Image: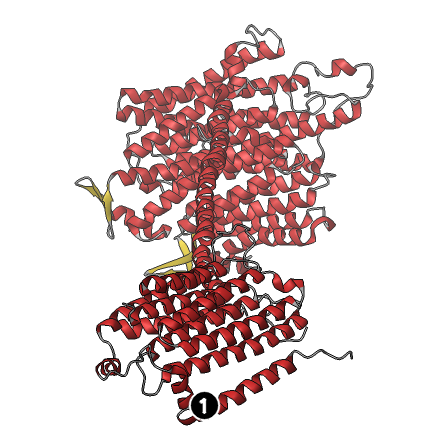
Amino acid sequence: MITLTHFLVVSACIFCIGLYTVLSKKNAIMILVGIELMINASILNFVAFGKYDKVSYGGQIFALFAIVLAAAAVAVGLALVLNVYRHYKTINPDEINELKDK
Amino acid sequence: MNQLAHISPIYTALLTVAAPFVAFLYQALVGKRDQSGIISLLGIVCSFIFAALTWLAIWNHPVVSAQLTWFIIGASTFKVGILLNNLSVLMLLLVSTVALPVHIYSRAYMKGDPGVHRYWMYLSLFCFAMLGLVIMDSLLLMYIFWELVGFASYLLIGFWFTRETAVQANKKAFLVNRIGDLGFLIGLAIIFTQFKTLNLVDLFGEAGLIYQSAITNGQWVSPVNSMDQIWLTIAGLAFFIAAMAKSAQFPLHVWLPDAMEGPTSVSSLIHAATMVAAGVFLLATVFPLFNESALLFIAIIGTITAASAAYFALGQYDIKRILAFSTISQLGFMMVGIGIGTWDAALFHLVTHAFFKCLLFLSAGAIIHEMAHFKVHSQLDFDPQDLRNMGGLRKYMPKTFMLMSIASLALAGFPLTSGYLSKDSIVISAYEWALSKGDFYLLIPILLVIVSILTAFYIGRLIFKAFFGDFRIMDQVRDKLHDAPLHEASKTMLIPMFLLGLCCLFPVFSLNPVSYHDSWLMDGLLLDEYTFAPSHNAHVIIPLLLLIGSVVSWIIGWKWYVQQKYPLNANSLSLRAAFNQAYINELYQWIFVDGTLKLAQFCYWFDRYVVDSLVAFIQFIVLSLSRLSVWIDKHIVDGFVNAVASVAYWTGNQVRLVQNGKLQTALYSVFLFVLLGLIYLIFF
Amino acid sequence: MEIILFYAFAVLAIGSALLLVNLKNIARVLFLFFIVLFAMAGLYLFALADFVAITQIMVYVGGVLILMLFAFMLSNKELLKDLQDSSGSFLSMPKWQAIVLTLGFLTLMILGINEWQQSIPTWILQARQNNTEIIPTDNNIQQIGLRFMTFYVLPFEVISVFLMMALIGASHLSRKERNR
């Protein structure tokens, strides 16, 4: 029997992996990937709980919204990364530590 | 004259003392510009006149004294003043009478000497000090003048200070006199503690404190204090030590032969007639203080002095040295005179001795003066004072010969001279005293008789060797000189000598040439009674004994020295010992001088190696402590501060890493705090 | 049977995620991400959310992932490198602080889930009682469509506008700079 707990555990794992990726990678795109993983984990959470909501389908609706938001975030994020690269000539977040224009 | 007689004796006495002092000041201020000495001469003439006036007023008249308050310490008042009794005016007259011929003589003797202005200055100073000494009425003031006399003597002995021997001699004289001064001070201290006064009248006068004190139960009790009876003896001995140094008694006599380095006129005045008599004068003044043991000690020392000095005189070749030892010997006689209780006899001998000894020295000075001229003239190098270079001077200096012979007869105690009276008085009194004491005490008069005979012998030796025979040094220059090598002394020298010669004869002192009891001098100083009974036998036998002894010794001397039949070995041990003064000087040098130098070296070594190493050790400790504290300060104190700083730095360094501008660090912190917050909310 | 499939999809998702964390080459990372997304879609199906799964595949994989792939493949070679650590080996030690935090979060969530399991919220219990769970025979698409147009019409419109804004913004941000 697949209980709610299974989904939650998987979601927790994915979320943590995404968190780790965000915190320890030295490439901006990897950070974006991490963010995506976290968002995915949250979507799984939504969907798992939404199974019990036939009245207003709240979980699934919101999962859809989250997907849209994730897409938007990725689009804008990539545009930003491109601009940053043009400016700093690198996308290592450790080196992008000044606000001053070079 | 009447008016003069009405002047108070106090003032005449003060003028006697002040006249030479004024001369001293004058000569000190004027210095080289006045080398004639005429002011000093005038000073001493005034002094003589005033001394005579004082003597006339006071001799055998009531005692006169005057006082002023000097200072007050606590409850004691110190007064200064003068005391004029028979003794002091006699001494006053004696000093000025002997000083006057010496001043006249000096004008000729010291003529041409480059430092003669100093000579007059020192001579006047000495006269002032000596005259002041005899009229003072307080022991303290006496001490002051006592020291001043010693100082003047020091200056005069070292008058020719460019000579090494003169400098050594005056240093020696001063040091030995200091020992005497120490004795004087100890005596002063004891007397002051016991009687609370130093005034001569209060102490030794008719109703004096001395006479009111007595020895009871082993304590010396005085009206104001009492102490153990040993202190009475010690006080007497202390004053005697003072006299021993000043009057050259054994063993402190060593300075007097060396003092002959000074000019002969100085030797005649100071070291024959006056300064050395100051010791006898002191003892006569404090005579009531002496008890039996002190007096016996004085007599013994006097005898030893007389005997040893006569022995030393036998082996000397220098004229002045012979006369110096003769002085020491006669001073020994005077001390015996005091020791047996007859201080009037001692003073009588002092007065006569002053005249004939002064004359002896002045004659010797004349001889030396002429011999020195001869030395310059003949360009030979010899000692003008050595007897062995002289001889046959009778031909060249007859007047000097005659005067010197008269003085020698007086010294030997030949009848019809003044010396006969005074010397016999002492020897006879010694014999009577010994009789009253016990047989063992006869040793003293026997020794005194022997010494008298020796005295005659050595002075005869001097006369024979100097005036008889051939002029020994002449042998070397016989072909060089044609006229007489020596001349008679000048008139300026002869006249004072002549005056002194007159005083060597008996009429000046007593109209009876045989008995001394008739002398006016002894009458004036007469003690109430002697402590011993007179013996008529002694009055006849002893003078006879002495006369025969003197004649025999002269006959022997004539044979040995004039006829050159000298049987003894001139280089024998006993004669060499006599010449070297029984090596006493060497003994003193070894004990005192070398001892002091070795002590000084030891102190230097101690200071350098012990004290300095102690100091260096302390320095080492202090430096080590300071190094230790430097280390502590640097490593521990600073280390602590540095450690605190390092901790702060490290903490800051660690905390700084938070703000490294990295994106992921910020994200990390956010998630960390979220986690911590959740943990807190869930579990607490 | 379901369990096994479920575990298979779960393992696939988590395994791919773990794998993609350790890779250096971004291209490979993106492809693994692709697999992760598919696995997640499969998991959605087990939660009886078929529309969400399809949407995930269409939008996420077909849109987002392609966008990322195109974005970095068409750019400099520099962007391919992940300069995480230069030690070189595949199993090199990653950053320990991130590991700790991650494990902390994981632990916390697992603990929370365990606790939650004891006290399931009431609305779920009610839903179970009232039989308002979604059952596999439901027509999810119709229901979601209905809801979109009635209940959630405002958020629907807003999110469309929002998406348009984001995309316009993104395209503006990444325009080519004119030569100055």
Residue B195 image position (x, y, % from top left):
29, 51
Per the image, the residue denoted by label 1 is C155
Q: Who's the residue at 56% across and 68% down the image?
A: A29
- Can residue B524 be seen here? no
Q: Which residue occupies the foreground of this view, B191 or A23? A: A23
Q: Amino acid at mark 1?
A: Pro
Residue B345 image position (x, y, % from top left):
40, 34
- Quarter in which the N terminus of chain C is drawn: bottom left
Q: Which residue occupies the foreground of this view, A14 or B97? A: A14
**B91 up-or-down from A12: above or below:** above
Q: Who's the residue at 54% across and 66% down the image?
A: A30
Residue C82 image position (x, y, % from top left):
57, 60
- Quarter in which the C terminus of chain C is drawn: bottom right
Left or right relative to B47: residue B546: left
Left or right relative to B115: residue B232: left
Residue C79 image position (x, y, % from top left):
62, 64
Q: Residues within 10 Å of mark 1 (few under 14, many from 20)?
A: some
Chain containing the residue with disc 1: C
